[in-house]
Image (cartoon, rainbow, N blue to C red):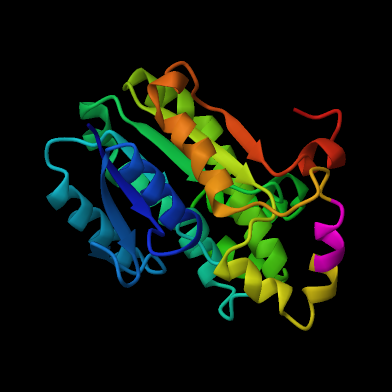
Amino acid sequence: MGLYIVSGASSGIGAAVCQRLIDDGETVIGLDRISAQINADLVTPSGRENAVAQCRALAKSGLDGLVCCAGVGSTFSDVSAIPQVNYFGSIDLVIGLGDLLAMKSGAVVLVSSNSASQSTEMDYVNALLAADRNGIAESLLKITGHGAYSGAKQAISKWMRRNAPDYARRGIRLNAVAPGYTRTAMTADAENHPEYGKAIAEFLSTIPLGRAGETRDIAQAIGFLLSNEASFVTGSILYVDGGHDAMFRPDSY
């Protein structure tokens, strides 16, 4: 069976993905800030370099897949950490492990969000895509935590789409999932937040399928994108959101 690395492996969607892969008989290397096989802090460039180095040491013969689940939410106390983990914490892993993925024609799944399409913070998104550190810092002075989160998710979606053809030529499939509201420890913070709690409750009531997502829902979609059943799927964003995106953007696809 294959060898997979999952970031954000200790909780939430990442933990559910690890369990799905283990149930499928795969070998999984978990990466997280604490309580994982690889412990690394993705907030800083040096932390991401450390993560890549540890991954490379454990996957010298190649990788069958990489799933980037590590992230922090819109209510995180340090807004500047949101793009560092949610955007750079994913693409730096993909770039740093690209040759190992190419060795086994591996698959990558990034975790975007159905909020990505709602972001209007284009200066911020463009600064992320250009790796313009000054532009990112200036943008963060003007936007909310929600703007930092949704903008980072839009940037990760655009990065994936822009790079998927080149990675495909190397034998690597790049895809993303765009979860809707999914119950995790991170979203529990938002539900209990004095500023966001009421809005979250109202938002949940509008999900067409009538419930919030569970981590296993997202893990099943990721499992499909990693599998041979998706061998001709690359450059795609799979919405796993109970129908919310279709409701909000019925004429966009």
Rendered residue at 54%/62% (across/down):
83
Question: Residue at image x 69%, y 55%?
Answer: 181
Q: Is residue 127 left or right of 102 when viewed as pictured?
A: right
Can see residue 186?
yes
Q: Residue at x 42, y 68 (%)?
A: 43
- Counting from the top left corner in percent of width and height, residue 80 is at 55, 72
Q: Position of residue 82 (x, y in %)?
A: 55, 66
Examine the residues drawn in magenta and state their main secondary structure. Answer: helix
Q: Tell me which residue sits at (64%, 56%) in the image.
A: 182
The magenta stretch spans which residues? Answer: 201-206
Can residue 18 be found in the magenta stretch?
no
Q: Quadrant of the C terminus?
A: top right
From what the image shows, is residue 186 above or below residue 17? below
Tell which of 188 and 19 is nearer to you: 19
Specify the farthest residue to the top.
232
Q: Viewed as shown, does residue 2 lie left or right of 138?
A: left
Q: Quadrant of residue 39?
A: bottom left
State the count of labels: 0
Give the answer, above or below, for where 140 lies relative to 57. Answer: below
Q: Position of residue 48 (x, y in %)?
A: 32, 61
| Picture quarter with the N terminus | top left
x, y percentage for residue 154?
A: 64, 47
